[in-house]
Image (tube, rainbow, N blue to C red):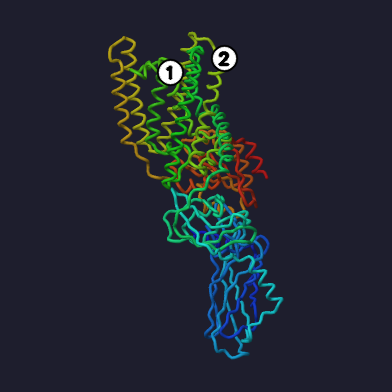
Amino acid sequence: MRLVSFVLMTLAAWLAIPAIAQTPGQRHIAIDLVAETDRPAAGGEVTLAFVSRPEAGWHGYWKNPGDAGVETEAHWTLPAGVTVGPIQYPVPHRLLIAGLMNYVYEGPFTQFVTLKLPAGLAAGMRLPIGVKLDYLVCTEEICVPESATLATALTVGDGAIPPKRRAEFDGWRRALPKPLGSPASFAIDGGTFRLGVPFPAGAPAKDVYFFPLTDGAIDYAAPQKVSREGDLLVVETKAKAGGPPAVEGVLATGEGQGFSVRATPGAVAAPQQAMAWGAALAAFAGAVLGGLILNVMPCVFPILSLKALSLARSGGEGARGEALAYTAGVVLMCVALGAILLALRAGGATVGWAFQLQDPRVIFVLLLLVTAIAFNLAGLFELSAPGMANRLAASGKGGAFATGALAAFVATPCAGPFMATALAAALVLPWWGALTVFAGLGLGLALPFLAIGFIPALRRRLPKPGPWMETLRRILAVPMFLTALALAWVLGQEAGVSGMTIGLAAAALLAAGLWWTGLRQAKGRALAWLPGTVAVVAALTGVAMITRAPAQAAAEVAGTEPFSETRLAQLRAEGRPVFAYFTADWCLTCKVNEKAVIETAAVRDALAKGKVAVLVGDWTDGDPALGRFIEAHNRAGVPLYLWYGRGGSQPEVLPQVLTQAMLIERAGG
C-alpha cells in the first residue's frame, strides 16, 4: 500500500512538473547537520542532529509514515571504526488525506543519530563525516522524493559541549519520546485493539494518540478512543488482521510530547464507559429522529400503507394494542438486525446498515413476500392463518407485529437525515449502547402509530370504515407492485439476468398458487390454502439457484468514473474538485437522489463547466474496501456524498437528501 501510494504520488509529482517547478538542487525541506560537540572524545559518543525545516505547505514523514509515505534512509560515509545508530524521530503529527492517515512533520523538526567513536584515537585527529539522506516530501496534493548530501568534520578531543550548543540540543530533544519505564499490554478482542499503558492518574495528558511503529497492528485511519482507569490509560481502536507478538510505538500525550511504548499481549479490560452514556443518549436521540423521518422516505411508504389500512378498518378499536404490537415488531426487528450487524463486524466483516440486502437470496425472498402482499391488497386472495396466529391476527396484534417487523426490514435500504450519523456512532459504542441506538431507530419509525394508538384526538381524525376501504386497498396495491418491480431490478443487479429470471418465475408461480387459493376461498372450498402453500414452497426452492453474479464494472453514468482511493488521490493531486458519491442498487434513497438531482441535465452541465470529477462508489455487493472508506467518514452505510473543493484539504460531507442547487452552487465555486 505504501509503495503503491509512493509510486502514484511521485508519478503525480512528475505529471505536475509545471506546477511544482522544482529546479535542480532545490529542496522543499532544508536540512542542517549539527554535531552536539565538534570535539568528541575517543571511545565516547557524539550526537548528530538533522535540523529540518519544511517549506510552507510541505511535510516530511515519521519512521512509520502511516498509510502512505516513505521512511527516511541514511547512507553514511564514516571514518574507520566509527559506527552510527538508527535515526531517532521526534513525536509526529497526524494528517488525514482522502481517508489515508499520514504520520508527518509539518513544521521544523529534528532527528538524531548517535556516533560511537573507537577508543585509542589520537587527540586532534580529524574525522570527516558524510551522509546522504533519501526522503519523501509532500504537500496534500503531490509528493517529491528528495536527497540531501550533508557533511561535517569532527576532531578528536575532550568531548566538551559548548553551553549554547547544549541548550540547542536540549530544546530539540524535548520533542523526542521519553522511555515509558513500565511495560504495557495489548489485547485484540473481536476486531478491537486495546492498548493498556501504565500512566499515573495525576499526570497530565491531552489529545492522547498512539502512533504505532509496528506495522499491521491497527487500522491507522480508524478513530482512537482513549480512557483513563486510575493509573491505567487505555487506547481502543480497530485492529488489523492477525496479532503481532509485540507492538511498539509512541504514545503522544500533548503538543510534541510523548512516550515510547512497547506492549506485549496481555489482558486489557474494556474501560467502564461512563462517558459513553452521553454519546449513547445523543446517538439514541438522533436514531429516534432519523427513524421518525424515515416514515416519509419513499422506501417505507408502501409498508406504512398496510398499517394505515388496518387502522382505518378497525375504526380505532384496539388501537393501543395494535400500536404497541406494531412498535414491538419494529423495535425487535431493528434490534435483531443491529445485533447481527455487530456480530458480523466482531467477526471481522466490514458491513454496514442494510448489510442483509447485499445478499441476493435475501432480495429474492423479499421479492416473493412483497409480491404476495401486493396480490393480497389487489384482492387476489384473503389472508387467514390457523391456530394462535389466527387468533392474534383476529385481535389485530399479530398482524400489527408482523407489519411492524416488515416495515423495519424493508426500511433498511433507506438512510435519512440524523440516521446515518447515529448508526455510525452506534458502531463505536459498547454493545449495549449500540443496541439501544438500534432500538431508538425502531422507536422513531413506530412513533406515528404509537401516537395514534394513545392519543384519542388523533384516532378521532381517522376516517370511518366504509366501502371506500376496498378501493383504497386496491390503490395501495400499486406501490407494492412497484416495490416488487424495484426488488426484481435489484435482484438482476446482484444475481444477473439469470437470477432475475428465476426471481420473476418464482413470483409468477407464487401468484398462480395464490390466485388458485383465492378461487377456492371464493367458493368456500376446504383446504383452500393448499395450492398457495404448495406454490410458496415451490417458489422458495428457487433461493437455492440464486447466486451472486460475477463482479463486473458497474454501468457508468456519463461523465462519471468508478471510485477508488487511488483515482481520488490522482484527481486531488491534479488539483481538480471531486464529487464522490457512494450508492447501492438496493438503496432507494440513493436512487432518488441520483435520478432527481445528480443525473439531471442542470447538475451534469454545472459539474462539467466546473471541471468537477465525479467518482461513483458502488457498494451493492458490500465491497469491504468501500466499506472501510465509508466507515472512515463516520457513516455506517450509503448514501454518502463527499465534495472535495479545489485546494481544500478535507472533504465536505453533504446531506443525504440532495438538492440540485446544492451541487450547482459548489460546482460554480
Residue 51 in the image: state x and y as whole percent: 65, 71
Which part of the image, by quadrant, shows the C terminus?
top right
Q: Label 1: few (<14), some or many (≥20) within 10 Å?
A: many
Alpha-carbon span between mark 1 and mark 2: 28 Å
Q: Which mark is residue 377?
A: 1
Q: Secondary structure at mark 2?
A: helix
Residue 16 in the image: state x and y as whole percent: 60, 60
- Residue at figure coordinates x 49%, y 48% from the top left: 270
Which is more foreground, mark 1 or mark 2? 2
Instruction: Specify the amino acid type for callout 2.
Output: Pro
Give 8 or 32, whichever is nearer the viewer: 32
Q: Which mark is residue 123?
A: none
- Residue at figure coordinates x 57%, y 62% from the top left: 259
Residue under label 2, please give it: 456
Is 145 placed above or below 513 here?
Answer: below
Instruction: Specify the amino acid type for callout 1.
Output: Leu
Q: In this orientation, does residue 553 appear?
A: no
Residue 377 in the image: state x and y as whole percent: 43, 18
Give 219 or 325, whichever is nearer the viewer: 325
Q: Label 2: few (<14), some or many (≥20) within 10 Å?
A: few
